[in-house]
Image: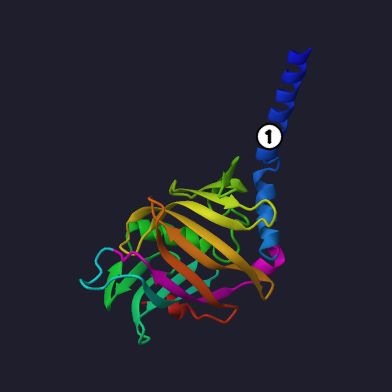
Amino acid sequence: MKNLIALLLCCGVAFLTSCRQQTTVDVDDVVDMMTEASGGAEALASLTDQVITLEMTMYVMPPGTPEGVEGPMTLAMTMTAKRPNKMRIDIYEPEGSIVHSECYDGAAGWTVDMGQRTDMTEAQLQQNESMAATFLDGYLNYQDKGFTLELLADEVVDEQNYMVLQVTDKHDNVEKHYINPETHFDERMSGNVANLTGEWEPVVVTSKDYKMVDGIAFPHHMAWYNATGEMTMEFTVKEVKHNTGVDDAVFME
């Protein structure tokens, strides 16, 4: 009898543990939850453009940094997105002039470093294509955008249980997104990201301090970690503006 009771208790504990660790919703449910947490489908659909002003701190300087320039270095940065698929990133030196730009017009892209223009690498083009498609409304209508989504087993990271959404773009690049099951915010991403030199680099990106701006939720703190777990970059959002009337000329050479 004692052995039977012990066996039943073990089975009960195993059952409760498996239930706690497994998300019972499907992929579309998770996308709907994320969309609603971000402000709702109607609010996201109303966005025509978004301009974000940030403060970026680099703790590890990228390859090609001039000799003698060391981190940490804090610079101003803007990110400009326009529907349906345009993206631009500008980084400014302390005096206010642009030191680095990345621009994607929906088909082609280029970067400018210290006044020298270069066509985007294949990695940068693929990344900007995916980022431009999801920047304003996330994975809403993800199939039309060419993404494949799969819901993996829940994972616990830093004592927080997450729903894990695996995202594959049309170029077979794979990312894992960690969704808080209570807030439904995307708080962590692991995958390859095109770095400032245009090469794929494995990173973990955390997103927190979500705030509502004009009814749209946006993380106000992001951090990048390299493959060894070292924080390489940190971003603090200073201002978010919506529907400012960004001209297409912003994304032209």
Vertical side of 155 occupied by 75: above or below: below
Q: Closest to the observer: 123 or 72?
A: 72
Vertical side of 114 occupied by 193: above or below: above
Residue under the point 69% across and 69% down: 43
How crowded is the residue under tag 1: few (<14 C-alpha within 10 Å), some, or many (20+)? few
Location of the C terminus by quadrant is bottom left
Q: In x, y percent, where is residue 119?
A: 30, 66
Vertical side of 163 occupied by 40: above or below: below
Residue 134 visible? The answer is no
Q: Is residue 63 magenta?
A: no
Q: In x, y percent, where is residue 160?
A: 61, 49
Report the amino acid beneath label 1. Answer: Thr
Location of the N terminus by quadrant is top right
Q: Closest to the observer: 242 or 218?
A: 218
Q: In x, y percent, where is residue 88?
A: 44, 72
Q: Tell me if 2 is positioned left or right of 54 in this view.
A: right
Q: Is residue 55 magenta?
A: yes
Q: Tell me if 101 is positioned left or right of 165 in this view.
A: left
Under circle 1, the secondary element is: helix
Farthest residue to the front: give it.
2
Residues in magenta, as a range: 40-62
Q: Which residue is mark 1?
A: 17
